[in-house]
Amino acid sequence: MNFIGSICLTDIPKELIKTGKNGKKYLNIWVNEYQNKPQNSDYTHYIKVRPTKDQYELAKNGPYYLGNIQPVDGEAPKRTEKPAAQNEEADDLPF
């Protein structure tokens, strides 16, 4: 089964993003099924930050829910629009 959804990048606390040995940025996540599905929604699962042991104190200030996902039959739909060009100087993302 495939899933689609999105996460809110601006809600990711910068302190929870770790740099790996390869120099790339990583965020540990947890994907879980809703026990009580939100009403009037196709979302069946949610994504939240999964802190490492050294990040636990920081992360317990909030659940840091990042987004929702839903199942789809077959492959995820293809995007028909081109993403907007990124301007790194105007970027307000936390990383």
Image: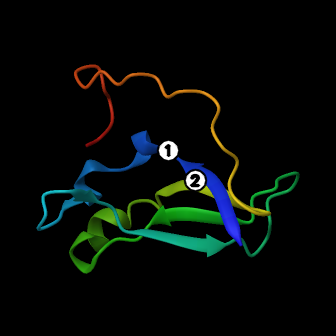
Location of residue 85 in the rendering, given as x and y in whole percent from the top left corner: 39, 22
Location of residue 82 in the rendering, given as x and y in whole percent from the top left corner: 53, 27
Q: Relative to residue 50, is residue 40 drawn left or right?
A: right
Between disc 2 and disc 1, whose residue precedes?
A: 1
Q: Residue furthest right?
A: 40
Q: Which of these two is toward me, 71 or 49?
A: 71
Q: Quadrant of residue 10?
A: top left
* Residue at (43% x, 44% y) in the render: 9
Tell me the SS state at disc 2: strand
> For mark 2, what is the residue?
67
Location of residue 79 in the rendering, given as x and y in whole percent from the top left corner: 63, 38
Q: CA distance from mark 2 to mark 1?
A: 6 Å
Q: How many marks?
A: 2
> For mark 1, what is the residue?
8
* Residue at (49% x, 71% y) in the render: 30
* Residue at (70% x, 47% y) in the render: 77
Badge 1 crowding class, 10 Å Cα cut-off, few under 14, some 14 to 19, many 20 or more, is: few
Q: Are marks 2 and 1 in contact (CB under 8 Å)?
A: yes
* Residue at (32% x, 50% y) in the render: 13
Q: What is the image's colouring?
A: rainbow
The correct choice, above or below, for 37 with respect to 81 in the image is below
